Image (cartoon, rainbow, N blue to C red):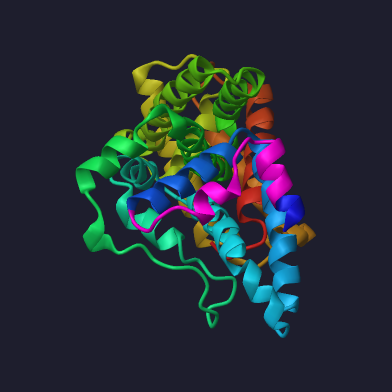
Amino acid sequence: MAATEAFLREEVEFELDTLVRAAKGLDKLKAVQEGVNAVNRNDATRDKFGVLAREMFKRYKGLLHNQAIYAFKPRRDAINAIYGAIQESTYAADISAVMSRIQQIVDESIDSLDIALEPTEDYGTKVDISSLDFERIEQEFLKPNNKNTTVQSVKTAVEQKLNRMLDQNPLRINYYEKYQGIIEAYNRGKDALAVEETFSQLKHFYGELSEEEARAAREGLTEAEQTIFDHLHLGKQLKDKEKHEIKAIARTLLEQLEAEHLKVTYWAEKTQTASAVRQQINNILFERLPYPVYDEEDVQIKTDLLFQYFRKSYGGMVA
């Protein structure tokens, strides 16, 4: 516990007593958010706090048989409130939930004050929601001293969305590279302006991801068909007529493979089935890719690209 408190005081400039001594209601809620914002200074401080807090929780739990440990319960609860709020925001899956937390902070933040290590243990105290002034809450949590937490929350939402989209379509690697550039710039500059700029860039970038995610529907394709189309389109300037042809090839290729070879469990590990998948891809591309936009060398290159895609995305499952 001493190590965790020392970290908070010396490395992120937050005094745990601020939270321990805070009155119930808005003051305690505000103190938790200040602690979270301090810990969220950067990824390194966030990770270090998590390690220290988990070690403290483990040791505290091991001493529950000793009545003397309960003298430290208020300090343990204060650390747990900060830790719980950070963990809750880490698993936010959608930007709308993040923005809701920023603008209407009450619903999720109140529960974060009572996150227990074990479901059967009663740690912490909840804020009485009836005592809160909702207008004051919004004013408090939109202030600059909450910006680090806001950036971390949006960053988490962006990462989760980006990882899911990369799993679906590896050709979206350019989005990953752009995201890395934003984060590298953020980690280099820690003044208020850098935090504000990062927040603005992340919001804009999330919008770009959402636009990309909706592209398949706009093109009249499924996500998998869009990925096949992107592999075939890569490196080629196509006219509208040729794009329609490539879309049709993507649909046909996926439909035929799913109807037959991809039904075989772990087909990629079976030499004969894997060879049949590659051959079927090659046959369809050879017969249907528009010539001379695609020559024989292009057919082989695209066959290899698509085979690797199917092996990675469908190789261990039944379609």
In depth, the one of 5 and 246 nearer the eye is 5
- Residue 266 in picture, x, y percent from top left: 69, 64
- The extreme bottom residue here reads 65
Please tell me whether residue 13 belongs to the stretch shown in magenta: yes
- Residue 192 in picture, x, y percent from top left: 50, 19
Res. 168 visible in picture: no
Q: From the viewer's perspective, is residue 38 above or below residue 277? A: above
The residue located at (33%, 37%) in the rendering is 140
- Residue 267 in picture, x, y percent from top left: 69, 61
Q: Is 183 displayed left or right of 85 in the figure? A: right
Q: From the viewer's perspective, is residue 83 above or below residue 42? A: below
In depth, the one of 115 and 179 nearer the eye is 115
For the image, the number of numbered tags is 0
Q: From the viewer's perspective, is residue 183 above or below residue 44? A: above
Q: Which residues, given as a range, are shown in magenta?
A: 5-25
The residue located at (66%, 56%) in the rendering is 315
Please tell me whether residue 213 belongs to the stretch shown in magenta: no
The quadrant of the image that shows the N terminus is: bottom right
The residue located at (41%, 45%) in the rendering is 30
Res. 196 visible in picture: yes
Q: Is 106 displayed left or right of 112 in the figure? A: left
Residue 217 lies in quadrant: top left
The residue located at (69%, 23%) in the rendering is 297
In depth, the one of 254 and 195 nearer the eye is 195
In depth, the one of 235 and 101 nearer the eye is 101
- Residue 213 in picture, x, y percent from top left: 40, 37
